[in-house]
Image: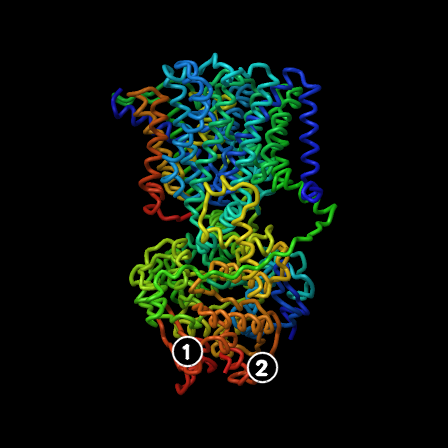
Amino acid sequence: MTLLQLAINGVALGAAYALIALGFVFIVNATGAVNFAHGDLVMAGGYVAVGLGSMAPVPIIVLLPLVAAIMFAIGIAFSLVAYFPLANRPPSTVFISTLLCGIVLQNLFLVLFGPQARAAPPFIKSGTVHLGAIEISIQALGTLAVAAVLIALQYLIFARTQVGRRLRATAQDRPMAQAIGIHASAMIAATFGAGTALAGIAGALLANQFFVYPTGGIPLSVYAYIAVVVGGWGSIAGAVIGAMMISLFQVVVSAYVSYAVATGLLYVALLLIFFFRPQGIFGELVQRRV
Amino acid sequence: MASWLFAGIRLPLILGAAALIAYAVFFANPYDLRVLTLCGIYALLVLGFQFVFGHAGAVSLAQATFFGIGGYVTGILATRFGFPFLITFPLSIAGPALLAVIIAVPVLKLEEHYFSLATLGIGLVVLLLAIQWSDVTGGTNGLSGIPAIKLPGFAVVDRRSVLWFVWGMVAIGCLLAHQVTRGLHGQAYHLMRENREAASSLGLNVAELRFGAFVLSAAYGGAAGALMAHVIHVVSPENLDLALMVTCLTMTVIGGRTRIAGAVLGATLIVYLREWFRVLENYYMIAYGTAALVTLILAPYGLVGALDRLRAFLIAPARAAPPIVPAPLMRTAARDASVVAAGGPLLTVDNVALAFGGVKALDGVSLFCNQGEIVGLIGPNGSGKTTLLNVISGLYACDDGRVTYLAHDITREPTYAIARLGIARTFQHIHLVDDLSVLDNIAVARAGIDGGGLMQAIVTVGRDRRLDAARRIAISAADRLGVAPVAMQPCGHLPYGTRRRVEIARAFATGPRVLLLDEPAAGLNEEEQRDLAERIRTFGADGITVLVVEHNLVFLAALAERLICLDRGKVIASGLPEAVRREPAVIEAYLGLEAGVAELALDEPP
Amino acid sequence: MSDVLEIESLCVAYGEVSALNDVTLSVNASEAVALVGANGAGKSTLFKSIVGFLRPRSGRLHFLGQDMTGVSPERRARLGLGYAPEGRRVFPGLTVRENLEVAVFGSRAERVQRLDQAFALFPQLAERQSQLGWQLSGGQQQMLAIGRALMGRPQLLLLDEPSLGLSPKLADEVLTAVKAIVRQGTAVLLAEQNVRKALACCDRAYVLEIGKVVLSGATSALRDTEEIRKAFLGA
């Protein structure tokens, strides 16, 4: 496989990872909390897609808005359980509560859907598209398109709308936001909702090619965590770039060694980054605009 | 004996333990014995985790990894090389400990999130190694056929013997944990958790404390893992994975992060919860996760903490403590008595500059203090007074300039070293440990000064004499600040003025030559201020140099022999108090009055 | 003249620590009132109680004639309470324009109109519309904080130590705006350590010392009194 082909594959996967990391960094920014169940919420989105798909066999592109809406609601419910009761405790407590929620979710999946891997309906249809020497699956194209649209949408909302400004203000200084009339709790719940919706969409898109299974979310939580650290804690652009880097690394390296070794090298690379540049690769380059 | 028994929640815990033992001896079938054995193994794991997570306050995600490495070392050495228990067990402890030592230095430097992620990353790499390096580790299936524990003379084969052996190990682990976390050493951890800066500025080497906790946690993890391998005769990647880490976290959070009883209670409860909920078949993990989450929300100090609170609620504590004989405060060993005798200034700040972003917090500040002098450092908000104290005490590194103390350049010395040399300080925000008594809060000041540390804590038998000695010094310091009457009360509920005096007493208890006080009078009423000023005056009479940062010029009026005024990072006036107070630049800085200059036309119509 | 803010016998404590003891003060609809006192006197505590971040132990706090017990900070802001806190606290990642816009809860047309008014009051902000909050100087941030607080068309503006960390000249610029603000219909309660400047731009003043009101009256009567000087310099 040529390097270009590998790069294309990496970018396609990275689009999905970017959505996951994006949702993760929203929650980090709004609450300072690391949501270790984020990957499980990605799986939840996949399962929702699987469930909807079994009820009405239509392509994902039609189901996506519904998946997003359901996941938004799940995100708000999640915040009511894992975050708000513990908002005044040290952040490590929220970290633990999300871990526990993750366990509950994983086993909920097991009970509801069984241990076997499930696939969601394809984005439009299965098959690949050829662009010269490059081959890219329709699923991947669809994922790229959706990710691009959502990232642009996210940017527009945050940069151009009052809601977006209020979300950013709440994330930057919650008491001050309250003092100018912003309903901070609602903003935070909405952030959880939005972050979870993004995770769910990523899950629905990934579920066709990579399948969903109860414990599939665990590595995704780790990747999101790594992406945000590598990209510079709290930076939205950094999270997206970090996610891309992870997927490119995985795809390119695992063409030469086994997938497991590639993953291992990824973690080693992460540790090296820590030792030499603890603030993340883009820690200073990308200003914390949002 | 009776008072020991009835203290805290000891009695219910001992009764509970006795009940479990009776059950194990008389009623348990082999399956139950196995479950109880597992409780012991996890208790050991959690005990270890408590060092780094509970006492040092760092969320390490490598505990399961250390557990797994311990198991694999035992498995590999026993099945492939046939080494006996007496060799594999110590190596199973040493292996993870060695790994911890290697990764500790870079990893412990990282901030919260990064530290957790780094430990997680290490765990994931080890997990992958365990799966991939199948020649050595047996791959996904792991290693089986690990023999039972064989000690010279007898083999620990039947389930009851295994149970006693494992719990015997747990008892040793509890004893060791008790040695490490009681007494002065334990209080040092408590203060470090509360506020690292306050701990460093009392001479505690925070990095060293965290290192010790991390390595200990690894050693315990390895021991528990080795025992597990012998009990279930198998070691596999499951012994290393994230699920086990989550279990360990859950047990710690539910039992109690810092209490030994909490480790045992948490481990036992979670193991049994799994057993009970197993009835629900597929739903049992959901129920168990939910139960854990509910406990997390409702019992922030774990179940042991909740039991404590319940007891305190039901039974008012009887605090009849034996009288403590005060000990005189030994001044920190004067390394250079000659310098002091020569009459040179004790502390010199030479052209110190420090900028944050573009803002010059300190812009070429120079000052000096002689021995026994009480110098006031005044200036409006934002003038750099606290920043200067932070530079002197080592919390901030200045960009330029020098700080000299007893003819030594201490500009780049770490905070704890500066404290041990004899410079102590207080903070604007008081950081006391609310749960500890006034006496113990002050006594912790000796932990960094009197040396000792982890190894000494471990080998101390019986009463912690260092704690006793520290308490004697503490009562003396408390007396100097007038808080001796409330010495046995916990700090949490004391009025602000008293807490302030306790904090100053704590700094005083390090036996300093120089005392840096940051706004000690803030929040005190007039009478308290007069009292405090009087006490600080006695420090000066004792030969202690005091540099007091204050806004409150009334408070300083009677106290300071000299005043230095900062404004916008520069010294704008220095000298005798009366002169400085009438200095036009000072009046301008404070009141905006410009003596002799036409008034600004602020009240004229635009 | 109705009282915009009425506080009677307010007691606020942090745990066991009494920060405000039996404080009584009021602000009328078209006046600027100064609250002076040394650091630790309780000025910020009082403001936090008015804004709603601290619950008083006892006493009355009425804003626009309504009892504020149990009313959330965001609700108080919407009722007409503007707050420019100590240390400015502009939103660092938002531009000047966004800092102002985020505080308006009305139509787009209203937003534009109020932006224009804010820029008219502080032309320096207009020049820097697209700069991020953290990039501004101290004085500019102070102006932005005040402008932001005014965007909600408040009945009362709480100004906490605006001159902190500013050069005398900049502090003057900022405090000159106080009179203009009152003329535009917003009452002002100004907390300041810089007594001279505070008294120069306000009609009445209260002096706070360790949580108690020790002196109060019209500024013309208080200005340059020996008592004020003594309270701050001990001479």
- Label 1 amino acid? Val
Residue C136 visible to the viewer: yes
Q: Secondary structure at mark 2?
A: strand
Place of residue A35 in the rendered image (x, y in percent of width and height, measured from the top left)? 50, 37
The correct choice, above or below, for B50 with respect to C28 in the image is: above
- Give the CA distance from mark 1 to mark 2: 26 Å
User: Where is residue B362 drawn, in percent x and y?
Assistant: 35, 65
Name the residue nearer the viewer: C165 or B502.
B502
Q: Based on the displayed image, in which of its 4 quarters is residue B577 positioned?
A: bottom left
Residue matched to label 1: B586
Q: Is residue B341 above or below residue B396?
A: below
Q: Nearer the viewer, residue A251 or B570?
A: B570
Name the chain letter of the residue that bears numbered label 2.
Answer: C
* Nearer to us in this view, B503 or B3: B3
Q: Residue at x 34, y 72 (%)?
A: B343
Label 2: how many residues lie within 10 Å, few (<14), some (14-19) or many (20+)? some
Horizontally, residue A107 falls left or right of residue C61, namely left
Relative vertical location of residue A283 with respect to residue B514 in this rendering, above or below: above
Crowd around label 1: few <14 · some 14–19 · many ≥20 (10 Å):
many
Mark number, residue C218: 2
| Residue A140, x across and y down, in percent | 38, 25
Q: How many marks?
A: 2
- Residue A145 figure quarter: top left
Where B464 falls versus B82 (above or below)?
below
